[in-house]
Image: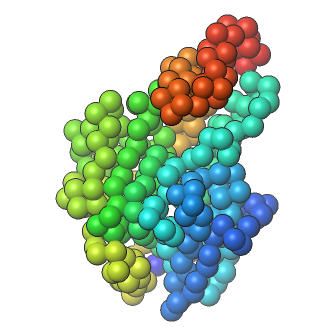
Amino acid sequence: MLRPTCSVLLRRRASALRPFATKPDLTLVEDRDGIRTITMNNPAKYNGWTDPMLRSWMGRFADAANDDDVKALILTGSGKYYCAGVDLSGTIKPMWPKQLHEQIYTFNKRVFDTFLEFPKPLCVAVNGPAIGASVTTATLADCVVASTTATFSTPFARLGVPPEGCSSVHFARLMGPENAMRMLGMDGWAPTAKEAAAVGLINECVAPEELLDAAHAQLRSRLANETYVKNHRGYADTAELMAVNDRESKDLADAFLAVPFLRAQADFLASKGKKKEALVFEALVATRPAWSLLL
């Protein structure tokens, strides 16, 4: 059950997401027994978070937050992947460095605030591999249920960027400092669903065919409990996590325009045979002393 004052406050915040237009083909919606399921529906692109995909599910979250018939929410994916994370080519567009920095900070913060501010019980049903921000957002929900086919990867260190999605604080609370460092550091540990459940990153690991039923059961147990208060796993405080998200979003915007990230992107693209794209990042590295003056 939600505390009345908290519910009103979070509903007002969620209503701010209304300007995000919803593209119906990118997200599917199904209602059953007061529980709404949002399915990210771009399996050909591994449900990657392009700008249209982000706006689609964020708009769906806003609709669910403001619909009195919806008592709880499930987020899942279609196809073999839950989500391949943020698709940089589908979210970042050329612009002046200072504007780009502000856009990265603002939009990154809003993505995670959408999870933090959602006023109703929220369960993420991870149907397959999850990468980057799709992992860290999931840990901000009330519960996470995963298929045995799921894995959880947060390759931030390898990409030359700092942790995001409150993971710099939240991961250690969920699964201890050692496991948090294994995932967030250069080790790049990507636990299976079974391993993630064992260390506390997620609540439950189930067979693929049982995934949505398990998510429904998790939410029904919370809705049936009159003393249940909307919260984040690890008993984290929403205001505290929002402050962490604000700091991390600023750090991420700084990192995206720094040499380690630009160099990592150039190396990654070159390893994939994308020479022209790699040269763009090489040029950005070479000219950074000049354009960084515009930040």
Farthest left residue in view: 198
Q: Where does the image place residue 11, in percent across and percent down from the top left?
A: 65, 68
Q: Which of 211/274 is in front?
A: 274
Q: Which of 255/159 is in front?
A: 159
Residue 168: quadrant of the picture: top left
Rendered residue at 51%/70% (across/down): 78
The answer to whether one can see residue 254 in this image is no
Vertical position of residue 107 compared to residue 149: above or below: above
Farthest top residue in view: 289
Way the structure is coloured: rainbow
Rendered residue at 40%/43% (across/down): 154
Image quarter of the C terminus:
top right
In the shown orientation, is residue 188 left or right of residue 61?
A: left
The answer to whether one can see residue 86 in this image is yes
Residue 101: quadrant of the picture: top right
In the shown orientation, is residue 271 left or right of residue 96?
A: left
Rendered residue at 67%/7% (across/down): 289
Vertical position of residue 52 compared to residue 80: above or below: above
Rendered residue at 41%/38% (across/down): 155
- Tally of numbered tags: 0
Farthest front residue in view: 273
Q: Where does the image place residue 147, in percent across and percent down from the top left?
A: 33, 69
Q: Where does the image place residue 267, in percent across and percent down from the top left?
A: 50, 24
Q: Where does the image place residue 23, in percent across and percent down from the top left?
A: 73, 67
